[in-house]
Image (cartoon, rainbow, N blue to C red):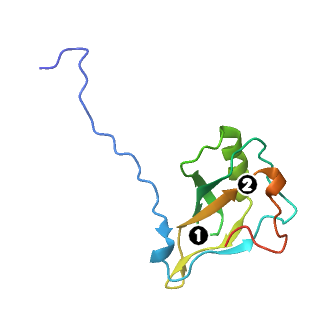
Amino acid sequence: MRAPNETSSIPIHKQSEPYYFPVKELTEKPLVSRDIPPDLGILLPEVASQSVGVWLFINEAGEIDRIKIGNSDLPPYAEVLLREYFGKVKFYPGKIDGAAVKSKLKIEVVIEPEKNSQRDPNRSLVQ
């Protein structure tokens, strides 16, 4: 018999996260349909030169569902700016045997001090 204040333990099943296929599992990788405008830049004053891994989680419609920023020394405001910046990119979705699927794409972003960063306006930010 249970005491009046005792509760039973009922397992709660969390809904699992959707699976995003890595590029190596796709038959067609996601392609940029709308890149970040070339004249749009990120100014990150006082941020040291570094390379940052950015994972883009792309849904079946080619829109960004989530952005994950890898280990870096970036201050929180810089991570927010990167998320906003890359959130503007649109893709043709990744596919498996012709069917659009959720996919994840890793991009290495090189951050340089403002004085040294001259971006070629004809070069896509997402390769």
Q: Please provide percent x and percent y for residue 20.
A: 49, 64
Q: Nearer the viewer, residue 106 or 71?
A: 71
Give, as a three-letter code, the residue at label 1.
Glu
- Tell me the residue at 55%/52% (across/down): 70
In the rendered view, would you say 10 is above or below 111?
Answer: above
Q: Classify 38 as above or below 5.
A: below
Residue bearing mark 2: 112
Q: Which residue is mark 1?
A: 60
Quadrant location of the N terminus?
top left
Q: Is 13 on the left-hand or right-hand side of 77?
A: left
Position of 127 with respect to 7 (left or right) is right
The secondary element bearing badge 2 is classed as loop
Provide residue 46's location: percent of width, then percent of height.
75, 41
Above or below residue 37? Residue 41 is above
Amino acid type, mark 2: Glu
Q: Quarter of the image holding residue 53? A: bottom right
Q: What is the quadrant of residue 52 in the picture?
A: bottom right
Q: Nearer the viewer, residue 104 or 44?
A: 44
Percent position of residue 50, x then y: 64, 53
**Is 55 in front, or is 98?**
55
Q: Which residue occupies the extreme left position in the image? A: 1
